[in-house]
C-alpha cells in the first residue's frame, strides 16, 4: 500500500535504516526506531500507532504491501536518495532548515525546546559556548544540543533534498 498524503506523517523505521531514522527526526518527523525488534512486533507497533513502516527488507515489504500497513521500500541506497523517495511518497514538498520548531531528538525522538544557553553552561564545552546563540534540550531524554558545524552539513543535505521535492 502506498502512503496517503499527509502534512505530518509518522514513521516506524526498521533496524536497517538507523541513519534515515535520525535524519527524519531532525527534519521534524515523529519517527520510531528500535534495534533488536522482531518483524512481528515492528509491524504490530506500526499498525497500532498508525505509522508508515519504512524498510529495506524486501521479504517484509512483499508480505505487507497488500495489508493495512502503510509500507515503503526505498529502492535507492544513498541516504539523500532514500529520503527523497520517502518524502515524495508522502507528498512532502519542503523540509525546513535546521534548527526548526519541529526538530526532534535524533536519539530518542523527543521534541527539542530552545533554552537559554546560560541554563546549560555546564553541559556545553567551554570552547563552544561563546560561539553559539542558543541551546536546545530534549523534552524526553534531557540531552542538550547546540548549532555546531554538523548543522550546516545537515542543512546542505536538506537543500539538496528540497531541489528534488515537488
Image (tube, rainbow, N blue to C red):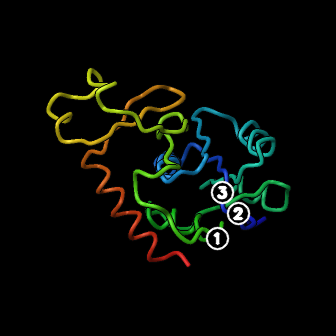
> Above or below — where is 62 with respect to 142?
below
Q: Are marks 2 and 3 in contact (CB under 8 Å)?
A: yes
Q: Residues within 10 Å of mark 3 (few under 14, many from 20)?
A: few
Mark toward the start of the polypeptide (1 vs 3): 3
Disc 1 marks which residue? 91
In percent of width and height, residue 31 lies at 60, 45
Total tally of numbered discs in the picture:
3
User: Residue at (79%, 54%) from the top-left corner?
Assistant: 69
Disc 2 marks which residue? 6
Quarter where residue 9 is shown = bottom right
In percent of width and height, residue 162 lies at 46, 71
- Residue 8's tag is 3
User: Gap between marks 2 and 3, in whole Å?
Assistant: 5 Å
User: Gap between marks 1 and 3, in whole Å?
Assistant: 10 Å
- Residue closest to the eye, 96 or 57: 96
Whether residue 89 sits left or right of residue 101 in the image: it is right
Which quadrant is the C terminus positioned in?
A: bottom right
Mark 1 or mark 3, whichever is nearer to me: 3
Element marked by disc 3:
loop
- Residue closest to the eye, 43 or 127: 127
User: Gap between marks 1 and 2, in whole Å?
Assistant: 7 Å
> Above or below — where is 4 with respect to 141?
below
Whether residue 83 sits left or right of residue 90 in the image: it is left
Q: Are marks 1 and 3 in contact (CB under 8 Å)?
A: no
Whether residue 39 sits left or right of residue 114 in the image: it is right
Residue projecting furthest to the top:
122
Element marked by disc 2:
loop
Q: Are marks 1 and 2 in contact (CB under 8 Å)?
A: yes
User: Residue at (76%, 42%) from the top-left corner?
Assistant: 49
Amino acid at each position: 500500500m502506498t502512503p496517503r498524503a499527509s502534512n505530518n506523517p509518522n514513521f516506524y523505521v526498521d533496524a536497517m535504516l538507523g541513519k534515515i531514522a535520525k535524519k527524519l527526526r531532525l527534519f521534524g518527523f515523529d519517527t520510531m526506531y528500535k534495534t533488536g525488534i522482531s518483524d512481528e512486533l515492528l509491524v504490530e507497533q506500526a499498525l497500532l500507532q498508525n505509522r508508515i513502516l519504512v524498510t529495506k527488507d524486501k521479504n517484509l515489504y512483499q508480505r505487507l504491501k497488500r495489508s493495512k500497513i502503510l509500507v515503503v521500500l526505498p529502492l535507492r541506497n544513498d541516504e539523500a536518495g532514500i529520503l527523497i523517495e520517502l518524502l515524495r511518497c508522502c507528498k512532502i514538498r519542503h523540509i525546513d532548515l535546521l534548527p526548526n520548531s519541529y526538530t526532534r531528538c535524533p536519539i530518542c525522538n523527543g521534541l527539542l525546546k530552545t533554552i537559554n544557553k546560560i541554563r546549560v553552561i555546564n553541559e556545553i564545552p567551554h570552547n563552544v559556548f561563546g560561539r553559539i546563540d542558543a541551546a536546545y534540550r530534549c523534552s524526553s531524554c534531557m540531552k542538550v544540543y547546540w548549532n555546531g558545524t554538523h548543522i550546516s552539513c545537515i542543512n546542505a543535505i536538506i537543500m539538496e533534498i528540497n531541489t528534488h521535492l515537488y
